[in-house]
């Protein structure tokens, strides 16, 4: 599947530290949620949120916050969308 990446030129996250969008090794609990909330707040005002979210769900992106969804959010969405009750889970 090919994809245009033109939308990324308008990404709100380009003006921020991308470390907000990807968790460091071993990050857990309140610290992780706090970082994810900051990333989601940036996504919320991003003009290409829809394109980013569609990309992350279609390809899929396994790590980081994309389109206002954390990797856990995306896993839950994929589980919900899987046909015939099949669970689609990442293996890594
Ligand atoms: S929706 Fe979030 S992760 Fe996606 S391009 Fe916009 S700011 Fe970046």
Image: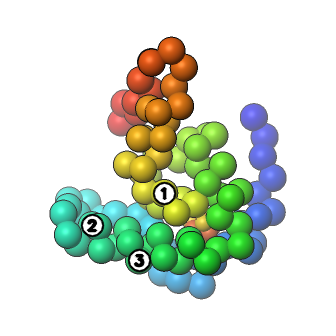
Say which residue label 1 marks: 69
Whether label 2 lies within 8 Å of ligand 1 gets the answer: no
Whether the residues at callouts 2 and 3 have beta carbons within 8 Å, the answer is no
Whether label 3 lies within 8 Å of ligand 1 gets the answer: no
Q: Please tell me which residue is depicted at 34% across the width and 73% down the height of the picture.
A: 35
Q: Residue 53: x and y, percent?
A: 61, 54
Figure colour scheme:
rainbow
Side of 59 where 28 appears, left or right: left
Q: Please tell me which residue is depicted at 20% across the width and 69% down the height of the picture.
A: 30
Q: Earlier in the sequence, mark 2 or mark 3?
A: 2
Is 64 situated above or below 86?
below
Say which residue label 3 marks: 38
* Mark 3 nearby-residue class (10 Å; few <14, some 14–19, many ≥20): few
Say which residue label 2 marks: 32
Q: Which element carries disc 3, helix, strand or loop?
A: helix
Q: Please tell me which residue is depicted at 58% across the width and 43% down the height of the picture.
A: 57
Q: Earlier in the sequence, mark 2 or mark 1?
A: 2
Q: Please tell me which residue is depicted at 29% across the width and 67% down the height of the picture.
A: 33
Q: How far apart are marks 1 and 3 (CA)?
A: 12 Å
Q: Which element carries disc 2, helix, strand or loop?
A: helix
Q: Which element carries disc 1, helix, strand or loop?
A: loop
Quarter that holds the C terminus: top left
Asked if one can make out residue 20 in the rendered structure from this viewpoint, the answer is: no
Q: Distance between the residues labelled 2 and 1?
A: 14 Å
* Mark 2 nearby-residue class (10 Å; few <14, some 14–19, many ≥20): some
Quarter that holds the N terminus: top right
Is 1 situated above or below 82?
below
């Amino acid at each position: 599947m090919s994809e245009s990446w033109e939308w990324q030129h308008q990404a709100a996250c380009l003006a921020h530290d991308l470390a907000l969008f990807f968790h460091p090794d071993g990050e857990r609990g309140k610290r992780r949620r706090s970082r994810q909330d900051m990333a989601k707040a940036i996504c919320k005002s991003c003009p290409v949120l829809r394109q980013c979210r569609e990309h992350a769900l279609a390809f899929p992106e396994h790590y980081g916050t994309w389109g206002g969804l954390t990797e856990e959010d995306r896993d839950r969405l994929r589980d919900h969308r899987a046909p015939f009750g099949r669970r689609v889970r990442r293996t890594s």
